[in-house]
Amino acid sequence: MAVHQIALDDDVGEIPRLNEWVEEVLAAEGVAAPIVFKMTLALEEAVVNVINHAFDGVAAPHRITLSLKVLPDQVRAELVDNGRGFDFAAAPAPDLTSPLDERPIGGLGLHLIRSMVDRVDYRRDGDENRLTIEKSLA
């Protein structure tokens, strides 16, 4: 069970490279296509959130690393960045009942991540954010 790791620049132009890397790593590890899709989508959203929000007002250099590990029963990803802290678990659930034109902009990305995977855990470790995402292989 190898740990695969990629470092990304803080630029949304990195997203195609991220997606390709996640897809290649998980496919090479024998992960089923529906799980590859869900993990790729969740990780893309998480990285875009880091790029667009975590580094706002934070002096460079900015660091983003992603580790992937395929275990016998799950895929585990850890996204680490040195941006501003954000308590993922404390973020409110979005309003999904009001008409679209009455809803506030934003907040759906976190909902998307939560709906794609089985477990999301956030912690602040010194000057780093650590977001762990897990998806069952079953």
Image: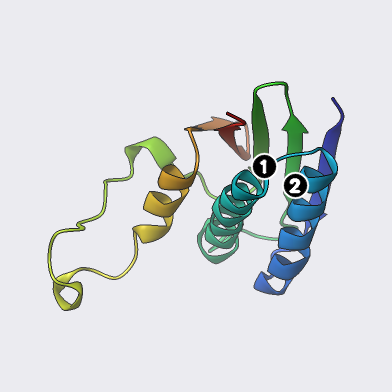
Q: Secondary structure at mark 1?
A: strand
Residue located beneath label 2 in the image:
65
The location of residue 77, given as percent across then percent down, is: 66, 37
Say what amino acid the circle numbered 1 marks. Val
Residue 11 in the image: above or below residue 84: below
Residue type beneath disc 2: Thr
Earlier in the chain: of badge 2 and badge 1, it is 2
Would you call the spot at circle 1 few (<14 residues within 10 Å), some (14-19), or many (20 or more)?
many
The image position of residue 67, as x and y in percent, is 75, 39
Q: Is residue 24 above or below residue 17?
A: above
Q: Is residue 127 above or below residue 25?
A: above
Q: Secondary structure at mark 2?
A: strand
- Determine whether, in the image, residue 58 is placed left or right of residue 95: right
Residue 94, x across and y down, in percent:
25, 54
Instruction: Say the numbered circle drawn on residue 80.
Output: 1
User: Between 128 and 22, which is closer to the camera in this rendering?
Assistant: 22
